[in-house]
Amino acid sequence: MHGHCTCGAVRYRLTDRPLFTHCCHCTWCQRETGSAFALNAMIETDRVDLLAGAPEEIVTPSASGKGQIILRCPSCHVALWSHYAGSGRRIAFVRVGTLEDPAACPPDVHIFTATRLPWVQIPAGARVYEAFYRRSEIWPPESLARRAALMADGPG
């Protein structure tokens, strides 16, 4: 999968399938994106290859209180991916809307739906959680194994 910012100064490629894709309906994601939710595909950061440009890191607050690092294009300022405190820089939360084919990366789960905007319709049969969930209960075994291998090195 390939992606880029709006102006094209920063281009990247995912060298593997994402581990899992979240559609987050929390009020923090709503505010940060200026939209009804954020759609993030999680992947090991070393599987995000920069093809052009260099994103700038912006540290912002987060609901956890530990902040997040958002990587943005230095020219058009579009957010490309983030790093959250829980997994550090080891996992990139790629903004699905920056992929050239965002339809190839649908959400695996809808989270924090307790604050979902009332007019957002979630498809029948989708995995839906009012808050978060237990990874071990819904992630595919391959994704769990990839994450475990990544996290085995300690804090990242």
Image (cartoon, rainbow, N blue to C red):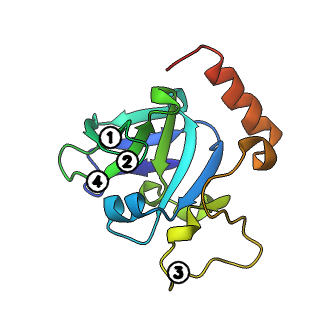
Q: Residue furthest bottom?
A: 119
The answer to which of 52 and 154 lies nearer the viewer is 154
State the residue position of label 3.
120
Relative height, residue 42 to residue 6 (above, below): above
- For label 2, the residue is 80
Instruction: Examine the image and state in which quarter residue 142 appears.
Output: top right
116 or 53, nearer to the observer: 116
Q: Secondary structure at mark 1?
A: strand
In the picture, the disc for residue 78 is 4
Judge the density around disc 1: few (<14), some (14-19), many (≥20) Cα neighbours within 10 Å. many
Circle 4 Cα neighbour tier, 10 Å, few/some/many (<14 / 14–19 / ≥20): some
Task: Indicate the amino acid at tag 1.
Answer: Leu
Please name the residue shown 35% across and 62% down the image. Answer: 33
CB under 8 Å between discs 2 and 1: yes
Q: Residues within 10 Å of mark 3 (few under 14, many from 20)?
A: few
Residue 39: image location, x then y, percent: 50, 59
